Amino acid sequence: EQISSSYLKTLTDASEESKSSGNISEVEKKIDPLTKFSLCHRVRQIQSSNVAQLNNIFNTDTRKTVELSSKCKEIINRELMFWHDRIQFEMRQTVAIMSNLSARMERIKKLNQQLRDLLAYFNDDTDSSVTSSTY
């Protein structure tokens, strides 16, 4: 970034020389390297600042992506836990309903057996009364 004083002196001398002789091309020759240096330096500055900006943008995007990913994981885990708990609850309800139905079925079987026994008893009784009345 700093230009040596001898280089500036050379440019000043060339500028004065060109004014007196009218030779502009000599001045252009002397200034051209400085201009090239300045432009190259500026391009490098822009490139390095672009790289720095790109790095900052990349780092910011990476951080935001990590944060978003973390939040998504939390939401997904919360949803999974909700559905896991819901399924567990429904399974407990299903087990309770199944055991209730099983108990009812056993009671119905017992009641059916009692009904058959009663019907058999009354059928036997009816048969004996019919046979006894005929004799």
Image (cartoon, rainbow, N blue to C red):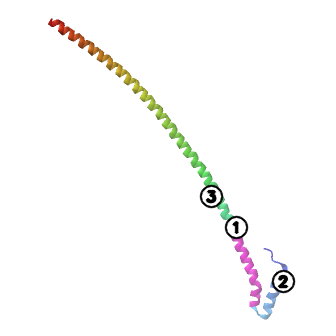
* Residue 46 x/y as whole percent: 69, 71
Q: Quadrant of the N terminus?
A: bottom right
Of residue 135 and residue 84, the one placed in the foreground of this image is 135
Crowd band around label 2 with a 10 angstrom C-alpha radius: few (<14), some (14–19), many (20+): few
Location of residue 103 with respect to 94 vertically, above or below? above
Please give the name of the residue rendered at 52% of the width and 40% of the height, measured from the top-left corner.
82
Answer above or below: position of 119 versus 53.
Answer: above
Q: Which residue is at 57% across, 49% downward? A: 72
- Tell me which amino acid carries mark 3: Asp
Left or right: 96 as drawn, with respect to 56: left
Mark 1 against mark 2, which lies toward the viewer?
1
Q: CA distance from mark 1 to mark 2?
A: 32 Å
Residue matched to label 3:
61
Tell which of 132 and 32 is nearer to you: 132
Q: Residue flagged by tag 1: what amino acid is it?
A: Ser
The residue to which callout 2 is attached is: 9
Instruction: Tell me whether the residue at label 1 lies in contact with that at label 2, contact meaning CB atoms closer than 8 angstroms.
Output: no
- Checking the image for residue 49, the label placed there is 1
Say if the magenta span includes residue 42.
Answer: yes
Percent coordinates x, y for residue 118 in the rendering: 29, 14
In the rendered view of the protein, which quadrant contains the C terminus?
A: top left
Is 30 positioned to the left or the right of 47 in the image? right
Q: Is residue 90 above or below residue 79?
A: above
Local SS, label 1: helix
Span of residues in magenta: 25-51
Dominant SS type (magenta) = helix
Residue 28 location in percent, x, y?
Answer: 74, 87
